[in-house]
Amino acid sequence: MLEFFKDYKYFAIVFSILSVIILTTFYNILKVEKPLPIYQPALVNYELVDSTIQHRKKYHK
């Protein structure tokens, strides 16, 4: 039985390394986190924005 495993030792090592690389690649590709967009007052309909910040285009709080 051990003779069988000795013959395929290198195949098992290469296959294991390849499997780990493929699994981590798929995990990183599918784990996409898209940040939420930040809407500036100039990008929104003026009727929906408070009149005190309608003139601001960027960096409002």
Image: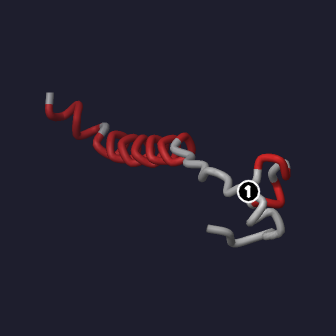
Task: Decide if residue 17 is on the left or right side of residue 28.
Answer: left
Nearer to us in this view, 12 or 50: 50
Q: Position of residue 47 (x, y in %)?
A: 83, 47
Q: Nearer the viewer, residue 28 or 21?
A: 28
Residue at image point 74% right, 60% down: 40
Query: From the image, which quarter does the C terminus lie in?
Result: bottom right
Tell me the residue at 69%/72% (across/down). Answer: 59
Picture residue at 73% right of the left edge, 56% below the top: 50
Q: Is residue 60 above or below residue 28?
A: below
Label 1: which secondary element = loop
Q: Residues within 10 Å of mark 1 (few under 14, many from 20)?
A: few
Quadrant of the drawing holding the N terminus:
top left
Q: Is residue 17 above or below residue 4?
A: below
* Residue at the spot of label 1: 50
Q: In the rendered view, does 28 fall on the left or right side of 54? A: left
Residue toward you, 29 or 21: 29
52 over 48 or under it: above or below: below
Residue 20 coordinates in the image, percent (x, y): 40, 45
